[in-house]
Image (cartoon, rainbow, N blue to C red):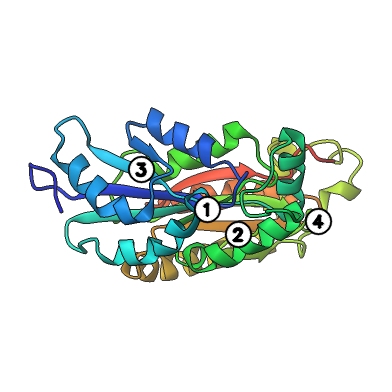
């Protein structure tokens, strides 16, 4: 399935947990030039893509599919299998968030979860997670919106779906604090708590890993340089396999105790090395400012 000029036709499937930010992600993709179709019954997916492909005004299509489609949603896997494998560049974006965060969002909006029926919101979330399990496991891009705002979500969507070379690996390096939990959307996790903690230096305590004084102190450690050398090699080793297996987006979590000093400095330094290696890299600091 190609454009009229013979190039591969781009399709993005946008799905995920209700309340996790699908609407924001869809608007971001629309701003990037994607033709967005919201709440399409999965059985109509092949026809919608075929019609879009024939339109001279549509270059790429993003289809939002979610549990609002009711029983139709269960037919999504069958619909995807009917799509041609050749000349179709299909990616899946999955929006995730913690149960606690989603419950707060539903309660603040005073709207029921589409699957809760006469039961609790948590019951609806559990049913939805079971229904979406296979799709989440095979998604190209998973974004956890638990601790990020709408602007950060747009940045992540833009990094993943702006015009780019399809076969290139794209990385997000995400600093975090273990005390706030491991990011659920991370593919790789590295623990840099083995490095001396700048928190115990009164001069550095109130600064962050974005400040030169903290960054210099962290990177002055031989162990920090050895880690960066070794971890960059690990990512270079797995990157080719990721691309071969169809995984073009990788999220690398770098954690320290609070996500303020060591993980921030090391994430910034790792991102520089990955960019030097030809990997397009976005840096985000999940927990910076929480202390």
Asked whether residue 44 appears in the rendered view, the answer is yes
Q: Residue 62 carries which label?
A: 3
Q: Find numbered disc 4 in the image and state the secondary structure of the residue it sits on.
A: loop
Front disc: 4 or 3:
3
Q: Of 31 and 264, which appears nearest the observer?
A: 31
From the image, tell me which residue sits under label 4: 257
Residue 34 lies in quadrant:
top left
Residue 29 in the image: x percent, y percent?
41, 36
Marks 2 and 3 sit apart, C-alpha to C-alpha, by: 21 Å
Q: Of 197 and 244, which appears nearest the observer?
A: 244
Identified at 76% across, 35% down, the residue is 108
Q: Find numbered disc 2 in the image and state the secondary structure of the residue it sits on.
A: helix
From the image, tell me which residue sits under label 2: 128
Q: Find numbered disc 1 in the image and state the secondary structure of the residue it sits on.
A: helix
Asked if the residue at tag 3 contacts the one at tag 4, i.e. Cβ–Cβ closer than 8 Å, the answer is no
Identified at 50% across, 47% down, the residue is 272
């Amino acid at each position: 399935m190609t454009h009229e000029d013979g190039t591969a036709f781009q399709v993005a499937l946008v799905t995920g947990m209700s309340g996790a930010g699908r609407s924001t992600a869809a608007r971001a993709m629309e701003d990037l030039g994607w033709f967005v179709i919201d709440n399409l019954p999965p059985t109509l997916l092949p026809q919608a893509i075929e019609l879009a492909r024939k339109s001279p005004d549509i270059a790429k299509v993003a289809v939002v599919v979610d549990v609002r489609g009711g029983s139709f949603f269960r037919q999504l896997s069958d619909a995807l299998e009917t799509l041609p494998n050749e000349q179709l560049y299909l990616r899946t974006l999955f929006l995730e968030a913690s149960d606690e965060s989603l419950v707060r969002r539903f309660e603040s909006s005073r709207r029921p979860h589409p699957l809760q029926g006469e039961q609790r919101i948590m019951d609806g979330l559990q049913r939805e997670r079971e229904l979406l399990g296979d799709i989440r496991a095979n998604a190209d891009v998973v974004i956890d919106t638990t601790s990020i705002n709408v602007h950060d979500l747009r940045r992540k969507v833009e990094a993943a779906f702006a015009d780019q070379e399809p076969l290139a690996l794209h990385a997000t390096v995400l600093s975090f604090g273990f005390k706030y939990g491991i990011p659920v959307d991370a593919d790789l996790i590295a623990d840099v708590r083995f490095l001396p903690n700048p928190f115990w230096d009164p001069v550095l305590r109130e600064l962050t890993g974005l400040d030169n004084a903290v960054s210099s102190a962290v990177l002055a450690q031989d162990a920090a340089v050895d880690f960066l050398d070794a971890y960059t090699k690990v990512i270079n080793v797995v990157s080719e396999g990721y691309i071969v297996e169809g995984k073009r987006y990788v999220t690398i979590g770098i954690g320290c105790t609070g996500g303020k000093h060591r993980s921030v400095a090391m994430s910034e330094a790792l991102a520089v090395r990955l960019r030097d290696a030809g990997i397009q890299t976005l840096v985000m600091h999940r927990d910076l400012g929480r202390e």
